[in-house]
Amino acid sequence: MPTIRPHHVVPAAYRPVLAHRPVRRLLAGLAVSYLGDGMSFVAVAWLALTLAPPASAGLWVGGTVAAYTLPGVAGALLLGRRLRRLPARRLVTADAALRALFLGLIPLTWATGQLTLPLYAALLAASSLLHAWGSAGTYTLLAELLPEDHRLAANTLVSSLTFAATIAGPALAGLLVTHLHPALVLGLDAASYLALAAAVLHTRPTRSAPPAPEPATTHGGARLLRTHPQLLGLLALTWLFNLLYGPVEVALPLHVTADLHATGTLLGAYWMLFGIGALLGGLTVGTLRRLPLWPTTLAIVLGWGLTLLPFAAHLPVAATIASFTLGGAIYGPFVPLSVTLLQQTAPPRHLATMLAARSAVLLTASPLGTALGGPLTTALGPADTLAASGLATVTLGTAAGVLLLTRRHRQPVRNREARPATRT
């Protein structure tokens, strides 16, 4: 029987990344923390339900979920002057330590009978204050550890770990909350961030970005992005893409319950297959080293929008499940591609600041899209809201493609006009 060796199983594009010991250690720490966050996806809301009175349970669930994410925007905007000069390793470690501290206080205060809803929301908010900087530090650290040719593969592995955690984390949390209190599950998430901090502390890049200028001469992340029109356009595209994705999270559950009169099992199947498709799609695209990043990014926007259109046609459930799974495979590579574009274009000394600004801006897109999903679903119905989201996304991708072609068509003309006339 032939022996299967690891290098025969792992695609060639990922072998240099996984052969790099510091990157391998970082990915292991991220995998543990992402699994913890996947469990918190269930535990945060579940603990709010156990603490809140029934009449206001919905408000507290929404408030605690927002507290676990949105303060990262404030942290990115208000703490930039202090944090943008820190090395990437310290940004990731600081975020992980803060997460571990305040999430760890939740099971402690619950065990002592002192956990109230306002205290719970405050602890969640404090734990998320540096999360935009932690995400920025992760991708900056990858850019410092690896040459440019290997960054797409590394970013894809990070994104794939996220999608894998969204599949495994909630399923594991569903089992744990039946035997453990949800506060204890959040304690496990705190422990997962301790594991990430330990991994990052032992990850030292052989080369690092040059130090940023003094804070007095350094622009904020938003101003830096405005000085790079291509990056500003990428951020605008990503923000609108995430905004238009938001209504899907509202309309799909209502489509399952109101239109199809089905149970949560079918909704779980939609999201599980979406996650599997995203995982496989991301890993596949990550193997393509010579990929044209901008055209591929626009193709993803168009393709994802097209996969939502069948919901309006009242096709059999199997058809919409297949389309949604395909949508996951198309959607999956978007984050690593957009991050790779930013890594390749941004000045190395400003990369962490720009990535933090990107994270802060994008944190507002999906919640706003989700908020718009309620009125849209009421006005159009669930299936038509899904299709409308898809049609708007196709329009976005088409408009962005036209702008990109126009810019590339004009660039040679500008270059020719800028050349001095030659004498004959």
Image: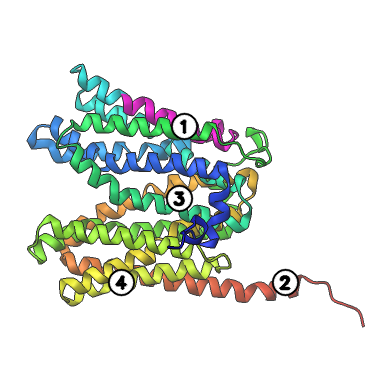
Q: Residues within 10 Å of mark 2 (few under 14, many from 20)?
A: few
Which mark sits nearer the N-terminus, 2 or 3? Answer: 3
> Which tag is nearer the camera, tag 2 or tag 4?
4
Helix, strand or loop at mark 3: helix
Which of the numbered marks, if any, corresponds to residue 415?
Answer: 2
Residue at 30%, 23% in the rendered image: 105
Separation of marks 1 and 4 at Cα, in angstroms:
39 Å
Tell me the kind of residue under disc 1.
Answer: Ala
Instruction: Give left or right: position of 156 versus 276.
Output: right
> Which tag is nearer the camera, tag 1 or tag 2?
1
Could you say which is closer to the camera, residue 347 or residue 148?
148
Tell me the kind of residue under disc 4.
Answer: Thr
Which of the numbered marks, if any, corresponds to residue 158?
Answer: 3
- Give the magenta part as a residue range: 80-104
In the displayed orientation, state which residue is furthest to the top. 112
Q: Name the residue under label 1.
A: 197
Q: Name the residue under label 4.
A: 307
Q: Quadrant of the C terminus?
A: bottom right
Where does the image place residue 237, in percent across and percent down from the top left? Answer: 45, 61
Q: In this view, does 1 lie above or below 394?
A: above
Separation of marks 2 and 4 at Cα, in angstroms:
40 Å
